[in-house]
Amino acid sequence: MADLVQFWKAPEDPLDCLYLATAEGRNPLESLVLPGTALKSIGHAVSELGVRGLDGEVLVTASPSREFRRVACFGIGKAEDFTVHSLRKFLRWVLEQAGRNREYQIAVALPVAPRDVDPEEARTVELAELALADYRFDRFRSRPDESTKVDGVHVVPLKGEDEKGLRIRLERARRVDTLVRLARDWGNRPGNDLTPERFAEEASAMFAGSPVRATVMGRKELEKDGLRGIVAVGQGSVQEPRMVKLEYRAKKPRASVVLAGKGVTFDAGGISLKPAAEMAEMKHDMAGAAAVVAAMRAVAEDEPPLKVVGLVPLVENLPSGTAVKPGDILTMSNGTTVEVDNTDAEGRLILADALAYSARFHPDIVVDLATLTGACKIALGSEMAGLFANDDSLAQQLERLGHRTGERVWRMPLLPEYRDLLRSEWADIKNSAGKWGSLPASAAFLERFVPDKVRWAHLDIAGVAYVQRSRNGLRPGATGFGVRLLMALLDEVAEKA
Ligand code: BES
Ligand code: MN
Ligand code: ZN
């Protein structure tokens, strides 16, 4: 990652380039803080260039001021249409362009705030996206391209911004950056590299010496505690299942929160095998788990006045002679019997265990994240996560925080009627409902395992956790969705509880 630094005065050596976002009909320099001479000469150059700010317009000139070698203007269209997605597109372009041009020290000016996030948080969102803009996953490249890495990104301050305010925002952006990268890396790592065992090891090692206590449960312990869903899904693979427990408790906790994340390190579908096309993508089926572990890292650093427990069930879902079969019936830890109608509906089986298990921590709030259904991806695409909740205020809070962090969620119905879809001939319920209503049915399934009187929210991140092609300014691969939302939720619960 490039260093993010504040740009208040001219450095000794000129920076390689000033990247300026320009909106239609606006003077891009109006809201920037730049040394007086630079402001004047660059303003002149920009108008000489004929910058109009049209979407995608790129104009570059030698810089007339001594602070920079060049000035590059990138048109972002109408300021009213500027969104987090256009922001990412701009920032990614900046980092790629700078890399190609061998510019190692650059300045970035963002005079326009994305209109789809909370105005108060827009600057932090911008800076976090700036930090993340050069994210790449090159762990498996034998020759990662180091030559095109920008070393320093100098942030041009905005009017009304002071050094302290910007410093705090930059610190927050760096932290978000570190945790989102962590979650993205896990999501991008293939199944042979990131097995349940390896994930459990890495996730728990991360908390050594921290106030979060990490415990890893193996197959025997899972069996002993009756976590049948995790054991059943894991039994088709030679890679044994795990559950990671991450427990944090403040001296006088104001509330108890459990975060649960689906951790399927690879989902072939099991005996109900998935089609070959796009199966490779199922290496990211642990994105929910990754977000939970990353959020627990934030807890370890912040030590909020809460009790927070992360529950991360980890399995590999493969077909084999020992795999769970369609028609098999499982007796879950809360006594519910489940007919495994489709072994590809494995996420809800392992999450059911985690949800039921959460009762031990007497939670006030339980939030789970899971790449649970293709149907959610069909419904909402990669723009918003699906949200189900048994509590209106928790749902509204998550919707609001979605707008604040840029990780937006759309509420879906948790109607009792959908429970009918899970009726089984042979057991209390079955794990799949077929095609129609399969999204709300998945939530209706989970709901059965939520402890009584708990405020619960389920986030289906199947559409948002991974992008196949470059989209919304993201490179193909894992997005780290959920990390920011969970961090914001915990911050707010700690403040308000
Ligand atoms: N991991 C998949 C869901 C998924 C699909 C995530 C596409 C990300 C992108 C999940 O385990 C699954 O296979 N769900 C099935 C459920 C069905 C069998 C009831 C689905 O959605 O098809
Ligand atoms: Mn599946
Ligand atoms: Zn899955």
Image: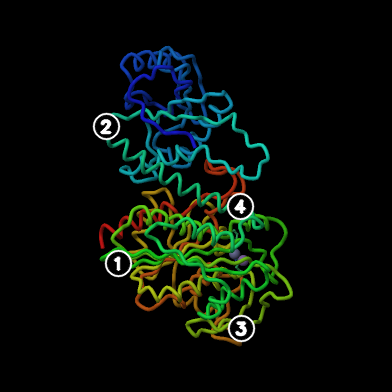
Q: Residue 476: where, in percent of width, then height?
A: 59, 45
Q: Which mark is residue 185?
A: none
The residue tagged 1 is 255
Q: Nearer the viewer, mark 3 or mark 4?
A: 4
Residue drawn where x is 55% and y is 49% of the image: 185
Q: Which of the marked residues, 1 or 3, is nearer the chain's N terminus?
A: 1
Q: Nearer the viewer, mark 4 or mark 2?
A: 4
Amino acid on which the number 3 mark rests in the picture: Ile
Q: Which residue was labeled with disc 2?
A: 162
Q: Name the kind of residue labelled 1 in the image.
A: Ala
The reply to whether the C-beta atoms of the residues labelled 1 and 3 are less than 8 Å apart is: no
- Left or right: 459, with 373 as reference point: left
- Element at label 2: loop
Q: Is residue 270 left or right of residue 471?
A: right
Question: Which residue carries the number 3 mark?
Answer: 329
Mark 1 → mark 3, Cα distance in angstroms: 36 Å
Between marks 1 and 3 in the image, the one whose residue lies nearer the viewer? 1
C-alpha separation, residue under disc 3 versus residue under disc 4: 33 Å
Q: Between disc 3 and disc 4, whose residue precedes? A: 4
* Image position of 108 with respect to 496: above or below: above
Q: Earlier in the sequence, mark 4 or mark 2?
A: 2
Q: Are marks 4 and 2 in contact (CB under 8 Å)?
A: no
Instruction: Write down which quadrant ligand 3 falls in.
Output: bottom right
- Can you identify the residue that label 4 sits on? 189
Q: Position of residue 164 (x, y in %)?
A: 27, 35
Dot 1 or dot 2: first in sequence order is: 2
Q: Looking at the image, is 295 positioned above or below residue 60? A: below
Q: How far apart, in angstroms, are the residues tagged by discs 4 and 2? A: 40 Å
Callouts 3 and 4 close, C-beta under 8 Å? no
Number of marks in the image? 4
Amino acid type at circle 2 is: Asp
- Label 3, label 2: how far apart the Cα atoms are: 62 Å
